[in-house]
Image (spheres, rainbow, N blue to C red):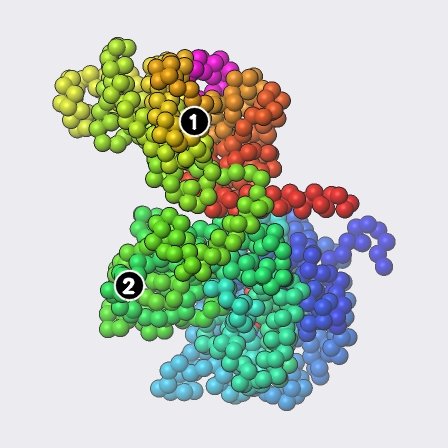
Amino acid sequence: MATTSSKSQKYVYLFGNKKADGNGGMKPLLGGKGANLAEMTRIGLPVPPGFTITTEVCTYYYAHKKTYPKELWGAVKSAVANTEKILGKRFGDVEKPLLVAVRSGARDSMPGMMDTILNLGLNDQTVVALEKASGNPRFAWDCYRRFIQMYGDVVMGVQKSPSEDHEPFEVVIEKLKAELFPGKEHVEDTKIDVKGLKELVARFKALVKERAGQEFPTDPWEQLKGAIGAVFGSWMNDRAIVYRRKYNIPTEWGTAVNVQSMVFGNTGDKSGSGVAFTRDPASGEKVFYGEFLINAQGEDVVAGVRTPKPVAELIKIMPEAAAELERVRQTLEKHFRDVQDFEFTIEDGKVFMLQTRNGKRTGLAAIRFAVEMEKEGLITWEEAVQRVPAEQLDQVLAPVFDRAAVKATKCIARGLPAGPGAATGQIYFNADRAAEAAHRGQKVLLVRVETSPEDLRGMIAAEGILTARGGVSSHAALVARQMGKVCVCGASVLQVDYQAKQMSVGGMTLKEGDFLSIDGTVGEVYPGEIKTAPSEIIQVLIAKTLDAKESRTYQYYAQLMKWCDKATRMKVRTNADSPDQAANAIGFGAVGIGLCRTEHMFFEGNRIDAMREMILADNLDDRKKALAKLLPYQRNDFAGIFRELKGLPATIRTLDPPLHEFLPHEADAQKDLAAKMGVPIEKIQRRVKELHEFNPMLGLRGCRLGIVHPEITEMQIRAIIEAAILVQKEGIPVKPEIMIVLVGFPKELQNQLEVVNRVAQQVQEEQKTKVKYMVGTMIEVPRGALMADEIAKDAEFFSFGTNDLTQTTLGMSRDDSGPFLQPYAEAEIIKQNPFATIDQLGVGKLMEMAVALGRKTRPDIKLGICGEHGGEPSSVKFCHRIGLNYVSCSPFRVPIARLAAAQAAIEEKKAKATVKKK
Ligand code: ADP
Ligand code: MG
Ligand code: MG
């Protein structure tokens, strides 16, 4: 065995014969596929033997100019020898040849993103051996033509050029079929006989020679080397890169390569290949779900070339294999304790397992799986909470079609309900055009005969996806499930004509740009634009148009939220500026307002006139007169909010934006305003000019406004306190929390605090009523965070304004970041958009510092966050970890934040438990 440390590095892990070097916990090293092949082997499931080359080799490969560690090839050879021994076959042998599959496998599955090569090891000699050994020449030659096709495509680059519509190998097949079956259309590949297949092999070889400029390799070892290189190479192909970016998969993870002995689903009618889920991943129902093709190799099922049959029908065709699969299904769920998505092949009646992983699922299915598996005792309630990706709750809150509107139209096509939800938009038949249209602001439906990984950009941009071909495991369905896109697939009555950019269905012809609607919950297609209605959960909670008892979806949701409350430490509040918004958020379980912006209130009706009058006033007296006109409006707004909150706290921030935002900048509008106010237009133009700022984000705004114009703060505080007393007198408790913004100097806060307390005192005396209120500050500039201990002397609470804190810490304007954020992401300078997900290392460090400093001065200081990040799951979890009391987010994000907060609490508990164990 190895002696030096560099040699002791293990690059190759074996599996086979119920033994495996690796296990399911080794996904970072072996990739998801490799780790689970090892795990399934260990628990005695029928896995064809083979081995996994680790992701470390991939890392090495890219770090060393695409070369391998020198020990690798030796290790591969002895691993092949191990497989040979188990099976009694030999690689490249002319009697009992071993054939292998070379399969990629990253840590997280990247469906269809990288390339797999089957039947490797065949050449003109071994194919004859396979023919003899199997006694099935048709099968042997079918394998050979498939191998040349895959290897030619993946390793030798024989692919369609941009000017071609079809894959060159497919063109050759179609041409041969046309010669063999003149006048017949849609002949299945299985109808080509041995002679035809031999001819196909010859033509494929010629095609490879012509396109790649070299002969197809005959040496199996050379083939193996080429295939391994291609899998590692595919880690950096465009598709893989786009996919990783979308799902934030780091490039440095790398892919593993699995080399596995072949089993054959294409030996005849007692064989087949399929994919299945242990439960329905779209609806979440506990039924065996999936499909298979008789006499086919795996790729045929996914590619959507032939239409597969549902697994339920296997019982009729191969009862024993069906029973075995049912056993496998149960074993998998018991062992992995989660819904599995697996691939199998049946060779002459015997079932083999080729892959398993936790099944991707829709938001609805995720909730249902979690709730039902808890009930079945398979998982604990804490695990159930962790099983639902917080972001996916969005899907169950997504709109559905208005029932009346659907009744009034007619369904023109039906397909498989592959991604639930309702989508309406303009149709596009090509991914690029769809993406462009979406970029122009259109709502887009991508319509394709079937989708492939090249369509990913278009799928991301589209509201929904509609395909004419393909089953529940087709590429379209897979991706839709993962992205939570509305999807109907395999709507076979659609006749799509890419050339003419149109499709016909039910006697109708639709052109690109026409409107269409699809319902991915039932799999139906409707012409035109259909009104959408809120999800059942919203109908129960917010609109109150549906009884909770009538909605199963709501009941799953409610159970999940109940568990969340049990787990959570951190509270969830909402950002709301009106009583309506507050009511919605409370329906979703918010326990207060974390940010009430007052400026929006000034835009309604003719309030803006008073606001403008205030801004245009030449002297304090006139300004106060204008402010006095605003007072009743503000008081009314606050009173409405307090009434809605019924004693829940409301953090209200004082005026924040620069004043020029309230003045018109266009000449026409300025003219109108001048006329309305009876002032010369020059006066308005002069004021606009005076207020012009080179850098408004850093200008006269926030507390600076209130310091320069204390009368503005005075009016706002008067409105808040008067409203509070008014509502309190109605018998409704109130909890106003006044927030002074953009504070960096302790003196700024002290200055405004004096105004707040003076006016509040005055109002209470006038009203002869006491009311409790708190005063705190938004931490949103770095100096505020750095001075937090000093600021906390006066602030009873901090709320992190992470939008501005991110802008000011990074020195990046969110609104101007468009041109460089994407290049930054591509160069991996930043991993995530810092305006969507908190930059934990930078901005987060400031937050942690402010938390510590604030608590040092005032141990019971209340800490929250009110930036956009407060509704983003990973940021919410971060807020939990640094010990905030609450997060605040927009009303419709509240359920997502609640789930993320609960998950953070459970993660923390688990982490503590493992530390204790150690
Ligand atoms: P992907 O990651 O794209 O799913 P896989 O490596 O799983 O790619 O391979 C694609 C298909 O090839 C699988 O669906 C499976 O049916 C088939 N396949 C993979 N390995 C083998 C094997 N050892 N024997 C037979 N078929 C295989
Ligand atoms: Mg697979
Ligand atoms: Mg701000």
Asked if ligand 1 lies within 8 A of label 2, the reply is no
Percent x, y of residue 432: 37, 55
Percent x, y of residue 125: 65, 81
Q: Nearer the viewer, residue 542 or 45?
A: 542
Asked if one can make out residue 334 in the rendered structure from this viewpoint, the answer is yes
Find numbered disc 2 in the image and state the secondary structure of the residue it sits on.
helix
Find numbered disc 1 in the image and state the secondary structure of the residue it sits on.
strand
Tell me the crowding category of disc 2: few under 14, some 14 to 19, or many 20 or more residues within 10 angstroms, Cα based: some
Q: Nearer the viewer, residue 185 or 360?
A: 360
In the depicted structure, whether residue 15 falls above or below residue 747:
below
Tell me the crowding category of disc 1: few under 14, some 14 to 19, or many 20 or more residues within 10 angstroms, Cα based: many
Q: Nearer the viewer, mark 2 or mark 1?
A: 1
Q: Is residue 290 left or right of residue 859?
A: left
Please give the count of numbered marks on the rendered protein: 2
Q: Which residue is mark 2?
A: 406
What type is the residue that disc 2 sits on?
A: Val
Asked if ligand 3 lies within 8 A of label 1, the reply is no
Percent x, y of residue 825: 50, 42
Q: Residue at x 80, y 54 (%)?
A: 8
Magenta-colored stretch includes residue 868: no
Asked if one can make out residue 156 in the rendered structure from this viewpoint, the answer is no
Q: Which mark is residue 736?
A: 1
Magenta part of the chain: 739-757
- Secondary structure predominantly adopted by residues drawn in magenta: helix
Q: Nearer the viewer, residue 403 or 221?
A: 403
